[in-house]
Image: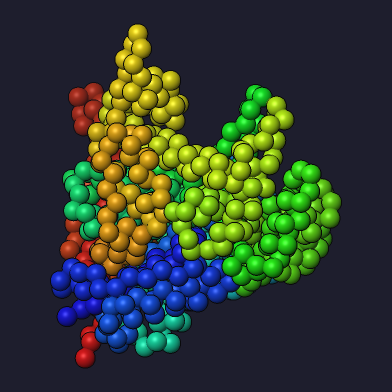
Amino acid sequence: MAYFLGVDTGGTYTDAVILDEAENRILGTAKSLTTRHDLALGIGGAVDRALAASGIAADQIALVSLSTTLATNALVEGQGGRVALISMGFDEDDLTRAGLADALKGDPVIRIAGGHNHAGIEAEKPDLTRLEAEVRALGPHVMGFAVAARFATRNPAHELAARDLIRSVTGRPVTCSHELSAQLNGPKRALTAVLNARLIGMIDRLVAACERHLQQIGINAPLMVVRGDGALISAAVVRERPIETVLSGPAASIVGARWLTGAQDALVSDIGGTTTDVALLRGGLPEIDPEGARVGGFRTMVEAVAMRTTGLGGDSEVHLLQEGMGGRLHLGPRRLLPISLLAMTTPAMVHEALDRWLSGPAPGEYDGRFVVPMQGVTQTGGLGPRDLAVLERINAPMPVAKARTSRLEAAALDRLVARGLVMLSGVTPSDASHVAGSLSDWDKSAAEKALQLMAMRKTAAGERFATDAAAMARMIIDQVTAQTVACLLEAALAEDPRFQGTDVTALARHPLLVAGLDQYQGIMAFSTQLALPVIGLGASAPSYYGAVGQRLGCQMILPEHAGVANAIGAVAGQISQRVSGLVTSPAQGRFVAHFASGPKAYGDRDAALDAMEAALREEAIRRASASGADDLRVESSRDIKEAGIEGQIIFVEATVTVTASGRPRVAHIR
């Protein structure tokens, strides 16, 4: 009998679940707060309690699988370590495409000659001497490097040469763009490589923390990690390619939703602390996004579940916006530490500050805001003197006004938040839920004071935003409903063939659609409802999703164990490795197979295709085996593009794809 352990590390909570694989039965679940300064503490708390609840001994666990939203959250919030991009053969204008400049956020770029043409022939020799000098100087100030060369998917030689040089000179992790995607579009590949490099340190800390606790308690089982398409990969592989964990948590939730409900057709909506993730389950399977995962405004080349991710969660920042003579709310996309949670660890400081602010005539600009140092995050390369001065001052949780002494330091504080060195604390929907009584985990008194302070703020007409803390809580919870409804409508409209190609964001807010949701009856009558059920997942789903279902006029399914669906999905998936390669025809009778080692020419089309398929089959099997798969199934396909010219069919190019998949290898339990 095999027992599996699933772990999901989110922005607020870490979940664990023990699954009896033979009987498909959950034996125990547990939650623990995610401990950013030492992830092993949160993981350990959840794992130990889940084992105790299940009655299963640690040495009986045959497989451990991990999913996480940390990578997704980091990209949504614009966080991550400082990296350097090595751009080989690209123009300055290329850095402005695909959102690459926004992803770099001012991080250094080294542009050198190099790259290949579309046929994989060297366009210009790379200046490796200059590259060595520049990376040697940058090495101590960045956490990793991304390398992108023009047409590297046709010939990766220059990326490989740069990678080997950087590793030998700096010892830092290096991400090559061709390792993440076989597609063209150099700027988009460069973007994906930059994001991967930025996430390496974070995911490495997560995997190391999990391994450390498993070893301490005597679990000697393979450790897998959920990929963005719901498949599993080994922990060793994910350390090299952390970008593949983007949408890992949401993908695991889709698998978990299917396991929990058996639903065939539904929208799955998973609300966490930072994001809400919505995907379509069709015929019991999620759709794969053909254009690559979109997260935090960036369109990557990572294969992942087709999902709409929005910065809305239980810990989203609450914004008070002036609108006309009145005001309105907006939530997210940044995650804050809920004040009711901060008060659990530093009650005296939080309550003293809240009481002082409430006793004043009107709230100051930064009243109700705190800043918390992130212990264990020490990468400060690239910070200026002002940034470092503010960081040194934040040696413990404190009010924001105490951390910054002038307006000039506001931008410095924002940079520290973006780098993940400090975190802001303020009012969130979680605080509102404590005031409303639907949550009771943290300090309700602190939440009431913080919402009372927010209610005292004035609209443009000079009126209070709300009469008291309870009214403020209702406004915030209603806003969660409104933004969740809009998110679900956008996802539904985007998947409905009738509305393909339309601006679904605008359509979801169109007055006629809103009138339909209102069931408006006047001279005209309107009625609109969602035709599919919604599966609501996440610990806070029961607090918010009842009203969402009523608004959309649809069935709302809130399954048992919905709060740990990600952890369930983490151990319910399979290992799958898919690799692709290209065969082109630069001249009549000449066929070029673009292997990872470089291009090779053939005089026969089928010979080139067969050679490419054989190489890909070998690589897919190698990757799947390295990822811990047993009993492999291998499938291949060929997408051949041809053109008719003067009555003849001419071969243009072909993409060959091979997929190797199987169940994870499990430990032999005595």
Query: Which residue is found at the position 49% from the left and 50% from the top?
Result: 436
* Residue drawn at point x = 28 percent, y = 44 percent: 556
What colouring does the structure picture have?
A: rainbow
In the image, residue 462 lies at what x, y percent?
A: 72, 30
Q: Relative to 284, is 582 on the left or the right? A: right
Q: Is residue 291 visible?
A: no
Residue 513 vertical placement versus 244 (above, below): above
Q: Dividing the picture into quarters, in which one does residue 508 lie?
A: top left
Decide: is 30 above or below 659.
below
- The residue furthest bottom is 670
Which image quarter is the N terminus in?
A: bottom left
Where is residue 362 shown, x and y percent of the image? 76, 43
Left/right of residue 12 with respect to residue 379 in the rendered view? left
Residue farthest toward the right in the current orientation of the protein = 406
At x 55%, y 41%, the residue is 471
Residue 569 higher or lower than 99, as above or below: below
Q: Is residue 443 left or right of residue 269?
A: right
Residue, far top:
523
Quadrant occupied by the C terminus: bottom left
The residue closer to the viewer here, 405 or 91, is 405
- Tell me which corner region of the image, top left, top right, bottom left or bottom right, holds residue 596: bottom left
* Residue 544: image location, x then y, percent: 41, 46
Front-most of residues 588 and 539: 539
Decide if residue 386 is in sight here: yes
Whole-percent x, y for residue 664 in the image: 25, 71
Q: Quadrant of residue 526?
A: top left
Instruction: Count every numbered label the image shows and give the total.
Output: 0
Please report the residue visible at 61 percent of the width from the left and 48 percent of the height from the top. 451
